[in-house]
Amino acid sequence: MKRFIVLFMALMVMLSLCSCSLLPKFLPDILPDRPGAENSDVIGKPESSENESGKEEEFDPSAVDLELKADFDEASGNETASVIAKDKDGKVLWTHNCGSYPAMQLENFTEIGKKGDKYFYSEGGKIVALSCVTGELLWKNSDFDGFAVKHVFGEDAIYLCGYFGPDFFAVSYGGATLKRIATLDNNYWGARDIALEGRKIAVTFDSSEDGNGGTLYLNAETYGIIRD
């Protein structure tokens, strides 16, 4: 009889705990996980992208460190390269593998740099644009066909020159060829630098007919050659 009374009282206590929603606290090992409960063993749990205010943070391309690393394969005699993106802590975000080209007098790969959310470089005579965020290939322009590339960023385009030509090339940030001039002046060769000087684009050459080299100018709006 006493045993029955004890069991009955224990049952009543458990029912009372259930009605007060306290049973999970006392019996965690026999109850299923509660909805919304944290599970630290979940694999691949996404990291929060929210800041302290609860708003989702926008990706900042300026925080990405990008590097073009070129390499030479002695077995094939080819040059290869890759673009590596890292965050501010040095963690690799993505890697883009470039093409492979026979080594020659001038390098096949040249870093152009980052502008906004795009990263630019040249490979095998082509101008290439990648997304800073994902490393996705955005476009590739094959009209340039130059090496040992020098560049300057303009408002609406990138201006470039190649040592053995073209002496001037303009490509939009969307990848369209705006202007290509193989030779600005037959008396100048070896374009080694390009710069913006107000409304003029200056292309500097290593050599000229008189042996001193020099600088030629173009109109930054029309791309016409400015003659003195």
Image: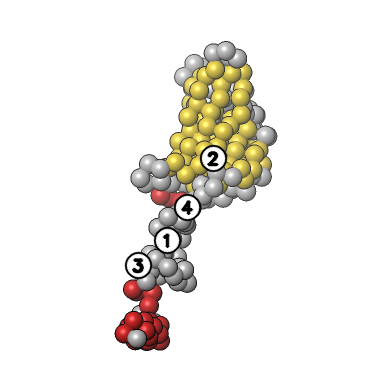
Q: CA distance from mark 3 to mark 4?
A: 24 Å
Q: Amino acid at mark 4?
A: Ile
* Residue in the foreground of this view, choosing between 109 and 91: 91
Residue at 47% in and 68% down = 32
Residue 47 makes an appearance in the image:
yes
Residue at disc 4, secondary structure: loop
Residue that mark 2 sits on: 120
Q: CA distance from mark 1 to mark 3?
A: 22 Å
Which image quadrant for residue 185? Answer: top right
Residue that mark 3 sits on: 52
Q: Are marks 2 and 4 in contact (CB under 8 Å)?
A: no
The image's mark for residue 77 is none
Residue that mark 4 sits on: 43
Residue that mark 1 sits on: 39
Residue at 57% in and 13% down = 75
- Residue 167 position, x and y percent, is 59, 30
Q: Amino acid at mark 1?
A: Asn
Q: CA distance from mark 1 to mark 4?
A: 10 Å
Q: Amino acid at mark 3?
A: Glu
